[in-house]
Amino acid sequence: MLATTLPPVPVLETERLVMRGHRPDDFDNVHRLWRSPEVAKFITGHPSTEMESQMRLLRYIGHWAAYGFGYWCVSERDTGDFVGDVGFGKLKRDMAPPVSGEPEIGWVLMPHHQGKGYATEAARAALEWGDANFGDSGTFCIFHPDNAGSIRVGEKLGYRFSHNAHYMGGDTPVYVRPANGG
């Protein structure tokens, strides 16, 4: 195995969750999450293959090294059970009008952990970290227009509708949050 020196990913802890950087041995959990048709429905439109899940995991690990921010692997504090992935990306999306420059927050949870408030709890912790580390940069998020649950989470976190962008063949709502919550 190659020895690598990557910048440390901060560990965040909430009342019920622990958020840490992804590791190669997280593959099984990441693939289990992203191969779920229920998870993929509003994000990619199709369950991920092993290769797609591996590429996503590598993107998670590499984001921290390339940009100093990224996604956290989220688990329950009490049980250690994998909850999902929450954090920030800097993605070159084929959107019109383009959205870029600011970090994009996202969250995706295992179906059996949805509806427990975990997305709000983890994303709030990520935003607190972002507010302390992004300076004057706000953040944004995008949603499938039919993903009412994630839209509700975004609004609870202070995201407000900005505009629709053409993405993946349809109109995609773009929500923004000013630096430090505005």
Image: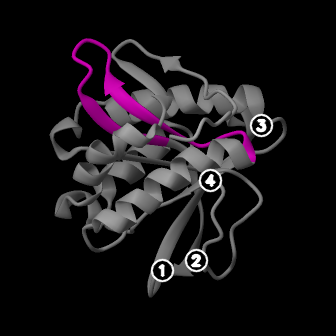
**Of marks 2 and 3, the one in the foreground:** 3
* Mark found first going from the N terminus, 2 or 4: 4
| Disc 2 from disc 1: Cα separation | 5 Å
* Mark found first going from the N terminus, 2 or 1: 2
Q: Where 92 falls versus 22 (above or below)? A: below
Residue 5 located left or right of residue 54 = right
Asked if one can make out residue 178 in the rendered structure from this viewpoint, the answer is: no
- Residue wearing tag 1: 171
Q: Amino acid at mark 2?
A: Ala
**Of marks 1 and 3, the one in the foreground:** 3
Q: Residue sitting at 53 percent across and 25 percent down? A: 125
- Residue wearing tag 2: 165
Does the magenta portion include 87?
no
- Residue wearing tag 3: 134
| Disc 2 from disc 3: Cα separation | 24 Å
Q: Amino acid at mark 1?
A: Asp
**Of marks 3 and 4, the one in the foreground:** 3
Q: Amino acid at mark 4?
A: Phe
